[in-house]
Image: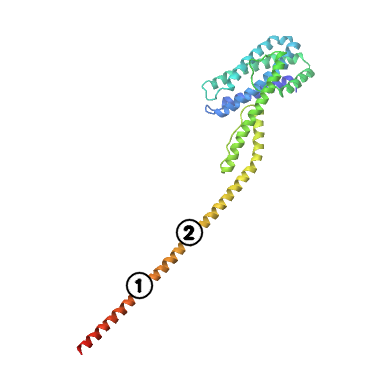
């Protein structure tokens, strides 16, 4: 892909993000944060490859672009400051939307000048092969370009090449760490949800594409490892439930046996009590009869 086509494609990608932001609802804070994070990454990478490769080549090979190059560098400088402010700004802040709107206006103006004036001059001056080589160099530079804005860094050779390379490494390491942290947190939430049997949380990683990719990979790997933990917990839970069930059954059986024993003892006591009462009553009747008989005999003997 030649250099001009590559840069135009970048412009299309960013414009699509701008339109997404403009269509987002007033309270779509999560969506707006995600879109702006993508805009920050895309513009940071785009600015870096232009400053490191395209602008120096244009200035040396196409003298007619000298003023355009200097103006473009100043526009980049302003845009990077706005991007750096947006990185740490809460999307609910009252100036968040206004700041993004100003950013969009500046970038659209910059893009229009490049595509209507700058790019045609470069295309007319360079051969197809030269543009192809330039495009290949920029495509390769994209792989290590900074993913965050660095407005204080130099934007012209040779310092910008060295600083840009270092910044790119730092940004990508930071993105990896951020992605690992996000992925680990999401995996932890997934694990808790599986153990508790609740619904998995719908969390979307934020930041650069590298950070989001790292978060997704980390979450997937952690979830795979976590399945064994969930199985163990479920087995333990099942065992505990069985033990508790057995304990409840044993307690129930003991209680039933105790109730039966008490009932048997009560019945026996009742029977014994009844028998004793009957015996006592019979004995009393017998004694009374005997006494009555004795009195009758004594009275008869006295009459004689």
Q: In the displayed image of the protein, which residue is found farthest to the right?
A: 129
Q: Is residue 24 left or right of residue 13?
A: left
Residue 130 visible in the current orientation? yes
Q: Is residue 19 left or right of residue 296?
A: right
Q: Is residue 73 left or right of residue 268?
A: right
Q: Is residue 75 above or below residue 254?
A: above
Residues 47 and 14: in front is: 47
Residue 45 drawn at (x, y percent): 68, 21
Rendered image quadrant of residue 177: top right
Residues 234 and 25: in front is: 234
Residue matched to label 2: 255
* Residues at circles 2 and 1 in contact by the CB criterion of under 8 Å: no
- Disc 1 secondary structure class: helix
- Neighbour class for label 2 at 10 Å: few (<14), some, many (≥20)? few
Q: Is residue 147 above or below residue 227?
A: above
**Residue at image location 31% in from the left, 76% down from the top:** 284
Who comes first in sequence, dot 2 or dot 1? 2
Mark 2 → mark 1, Cα distance in angstroms: 33 Å
Residue 18 drawn at (x, y percent): 60, 23
Residue 86 drawn at (x, y percent): 58, 21
- Disc 2 secondary structure class: helix
Q: Quadrant of the N terminus?
A: top right
Residue matched to label 1: 277
Residue 251 drawn at (x, y percent): 50, 56
**Residue at image location 28% in from the left, 79% down from the top:** 288
**Residue at image location 66% in from the left, 40% down from the top:** 225
């Amino acid at each position: 892909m030649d250099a001009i086509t590559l840069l135009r494609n970048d412009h299309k990608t960013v414009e699509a993000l701008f339109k997404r932001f403009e269509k987002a609802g007033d309270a779509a804070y999560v969506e707006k944060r995600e879109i702006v994070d993508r805009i920050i990454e895309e513009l940071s990478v785009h600015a870096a490859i232009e400053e490191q490769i395209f602008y120096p080549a244009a200035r040396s090979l196409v003298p007619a672009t000298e003023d355009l190059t200097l103006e473009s560098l100043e526009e980049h400088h302003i845009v990077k400051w706005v991007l750096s402010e947006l990185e740490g700004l809460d999307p609910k802040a009252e100036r968040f939307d206004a700041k993004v709107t100003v950013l969009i206006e500046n970038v659209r103006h910059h893009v229009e000048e490049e595509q209507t004036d700058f790019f045609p001059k470069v295309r007319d001056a360079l051969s197809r092969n030269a543009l192809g080589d330039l495009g290949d160099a920029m495509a390769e530079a994209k792989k290590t370009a900074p993913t965050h804005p660095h407005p204080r860094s130099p934007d012209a050779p040779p310092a910008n090449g060295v600083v840009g390379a270092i910044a790119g490494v730092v940004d990508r390491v930071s993105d990896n760490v951020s992605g690992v942290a996000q992925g680990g947190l999401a995996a932890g939430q997934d694990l808790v949800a599986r153990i508790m049997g609740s619904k998995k949380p719908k969390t979307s990683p934020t930041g650069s594409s590298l950070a989001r990719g790292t978060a997704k990979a980390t979450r997937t790997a952690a979830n795979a490892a976590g399945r064994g933990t969930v199985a163990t917990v479920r087995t333990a839970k099942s065992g505990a439930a069985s033990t508790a069930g057995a304990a409840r059954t044993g307690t129930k059986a003991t209680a039933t046996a105790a109730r039966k024993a008490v009932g048997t003892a009560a019945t026996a006591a009742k029977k014994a009590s009844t028998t004793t009462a009957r015996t006592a009553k019979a004995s009393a009747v017998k004694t009374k009869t005997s006494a009555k008989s004795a009195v009758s005999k004594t009275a008869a003997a006295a009459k004689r």
